[in-house]
Amino acid sequence: MKRLGLWVRRKKRLAGLFVMGDKIQYLALDIKRGGLSVKAMAEVDLEMAPSQRDVWADPGMLENRMLKIKREVGARWFRSAVLGIQAKDVMVKVIQLPRIEDGRGLRELFKMDFDKHFPFPASEAVFDVATIEHPLDAGGDVSYAVAAVSRSRPVESIIEVCGKVGLMVDAVEPSVMAAFRAMQGPEPPSERCNLYVMAGFYSSFIVVSYKNSGILYRNVSYGFGNERPDEDVFVSFAREIYSSANFVTTQLKGLGVGKIYIGGYGLNYADEIKEAVSSMTLIPVETVDPWDLWEIDGAPEERWGWDVTLGLALRGVDDE
């Protein structure tokens, strides 16, 4: 999977920090003798309303809660961190660009076409772009790439707050990319094409993968947080999953989804989601526990909902 980041320092660390909705999570991992284990982890509430509130509007409150995280992990950060930006603050899109064989100049090429793909100017954004493998790539003058774009303010705000509390930032990454990394595992599945669902607290992600690349990214409004959803939510959620899988078959040269993988908070309702999806398609449906998939020692008992933060921490695994 492409290691796409909105802002990258390129250090070798194994820690993630995710500010999401009404909470912050921090996770640091150790890697020893080829194995991964939890070094430190903590979660604190932001004491504010759900995810539609602007968490960047009160930097003083954010700094206060970050300091609480720091105290809970022993008054020091064990690793510099990769930061996650929640879905409502970042856009991830697969686009077409003229092919550049050596990859140099890709960012400048994308910047020239920025206004064609996103609703605000490049001067107000932080972004990254990387070429991907795509089933429609015929090897001609056009290549496919995934672009991640955020307005500058959320990224600048979180970096500023992290600086005040002494946490070095290695990269800023879209939450959907981190969740995809965590759920895909250290070795991609054998099928050429799969569909990953991160059933989140307030909203959810759907990613369709081709080989080692994401070729379709969707945010859907269904969440699986505090209270059990109504039965029609499971059906509607399954319909979004089915339509994404069907899009692949009809629009991408008949490429079929091999398996559907489900993770996140929704695993509290795994049977209900699997039953709803299986009623609409014959594609096999499996649940994914990233902690087991990556064989991480010291995983928490209450593990659902850490997919993004775990994926952020795992960004540096290949460097170690």
Image (spheres, rainbow, N blue to C red):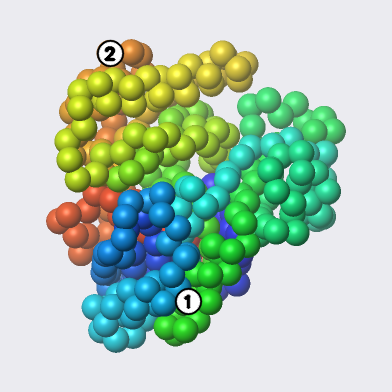
Residue 253 place in picture, x, y as percent: 62, 16
Amino acid at pointer 2: Ser
Residue 213 place in picture, x, y as percent: 56, 40
- Up the image or down, 217 lies above or below 179; here it is above
Q: Is disc 1 surrounded by few (<14), some (14 to 19) or many (20+) residues within 10 Å? A: some
Q: Which residue is mark 1?
A: 161
Q: Which mark is residue 269?
A: none
Q: Which residue is mark 2?
A: 279
For this view, does 294 lie left or right of residue 187?
left
Q: Determine the residue positioned at 83% across, 48% down.
A: 112
SS at circle 2: loop
| Residue 270 figure quarter | top left
What distance separates the C-alpha of mark 1 from that of mark 2?
A: 47 Å
SS at circle 1: helix
Q: Nearer the viewer, residue 226 or 186?
A: 226
Q: Determine the residue positioned at 53% across, 21% down.
A: 248
Residue 149 place in picture, x, y as percent: 63, 51
Amino acid at pointer 1: Val
Which numbered disc, 1 or 2, marks the residue closer to the eye? 1
| Residue 200 figure quarter | top left
The reply to whether residue 25 is in sight is: no
For this view, does 249 lie left or right of residue 167?
right
